[in-house]
Amino acid sequence: MSDTLIRHASFEGSTKDILVSDGVISAIANDLAVPLGAEVFDAKGLLVWPGMVNTHHHLAQSILKGMPSGINSNLNDWLIKVPFSAWPHFDAETMYVAAMIGFSELLRSGCTTCADHHYLYQEDYGPELESAVLRAAEDIGIRFVLCRGGATSTGSHLGLNHSGLIVNEDLDTMLRRLQDRLHNWHDPAPESMRRLVVAPTSLVHGAEPDHLRVLADFANEHNLRRHSHLLEVKRDEEITQQKYGMSAASYAEDVGWLGPDVWYAHLVHTDEEALAKFADSGTGIAHCPTSNCRLGSGIAPVTAMAAAGMPISLGVDGSASAESGSMANEAMLTWLLHRAIDGASSTSLEQVKQWSTVGGADLLGLNIGRICVGACADLVFFDLSEPRYAGVWMPEYAPIVCGEPVQVSRTMINGRWRVIDGQLVDIDTKKLLLKAEEKIRRLSNRIVGV
């Protein structure tokens, strides 16, 4: 990998040169000398950010946006009518196209790392869909974290139990498949382009307590991080009280699923007791405000979480419950939403930028999310020359205060250009969109009541 010298990089209120060597930022200073054989890119007029880090996605949903059958549904009804109705009709090619669409949305919105909570597994079905996601991540060049979901029992999961799907793997099958991916794909290095996370789909509804303890032991033995859904709706709390005589947060503690190596999606219905347990244990959140608004689930109390010291990150969630896979959109809504309920000083631009970059990086344990010597060279170059940004007095925060449509001129991931002049490198976008239209037509002809 050759060196790249980035001239006139405007970031964090200053303008300097950035030298990238072997995928890492090796120097930041004024008027750096050009190394022999280095590429030189003049970033004058562009705003440079560290790549944003998406800590919760469902890439399979990228071709299920705005399905009319679920457009006004709550979470459980929406699950039945949208993703679970499409699931039986997904093959590897459909999954590949959906993943490529999702990755493309992320790259064009300033995101360079995706943690996908993939859960399309059954006892005799699923690894081929997982492999399709991994192939798409490699083809498009994004930094990828596979949050390996699945259910060993459907238990109290209303969506699955009313969908007609029989999706549970037995625990031994799940562990065997995790082991295979761990040894044949996972890279534990801080600069890793591919990470495995142990991530049962629902902590409360998708696995028995003893299974969760076994999965926690597996993760701890192999130094893997853990992720799941929790407290997106009030039913999580109701079920743990009913079945186990304890709160959802206490249940997570009881089965060994709290700690600095754990983060949950949503945590909308977090009370003071739960907040204290999450904060004291260092358990983090993937805040997904658009999806939570779209499904009427509520608003996670992230300002209180941040004040208590909880690790905060942002996620786009599935595009079928947000109708977008834009990290810029999530950052803008995060900034606005909590000011609407908690007051104008409740969220700052600096804070939201940190949550969308280094917050996610730290939760995933990756050396990204910062522009500093020694960090991986995951860099996004926003073009602020469009009328959308005219008159912005704080250009450093333009992607948040102005929101979509953001204009990404270039994106570098691990020292390699993945977007040039607003176009994905080595990807035929027109051909991809035609493929997506073909897959959507096929699904619409097969899904009953769409």
Image (cartoon, grey):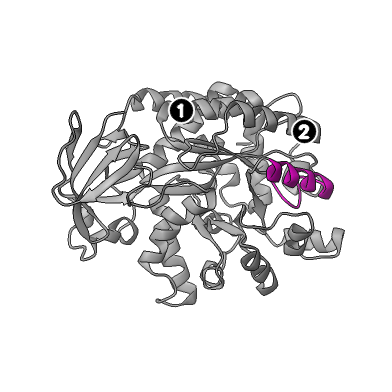
Q: Which mark is residue 158?
A: none
In the image, residue 211 lies in the stretch drawn in magenta = yes
In the image, residue 430 lies in the stretch drawn in magenta = no
Question: Residue 450, percent across and down?
Answer: 60, 36
Residue extent of the magenta highlight: 201-221
Q: Earlier in the sequence, mark 2 or mark 1?
A: 1
Can residue 71 be seen in this snapshot? yes
Q: Quadrant of residue 128?
A: top right
Question: Residue 278, percent across and down?
Answer: 64, 64
Q: Tell me if residue 111 comes above or below residue 446 in the rendering.
A: below
Q: Main secondary structure of the magenta part?
A: helix
Amino acid type of the residue tagged 2 in the rendering: Glu
Q: Nearer the viewer, residue 208 or 361?
A: 361
Q: CA distance from mark 2 to mark 1?
A: 27 Å
Label 1 secondary element: helix
Read off the residue under disc 2.
169
Read off the residue under disc 1.
138
The answer to whether residue 117 is left or right of residue 424 is right
The residue depicted at 55 percent of the width and 38 percent of the height is 188
Q: Residues within 10 Å of mark 1 (few under 14, many from 20)?
A: some
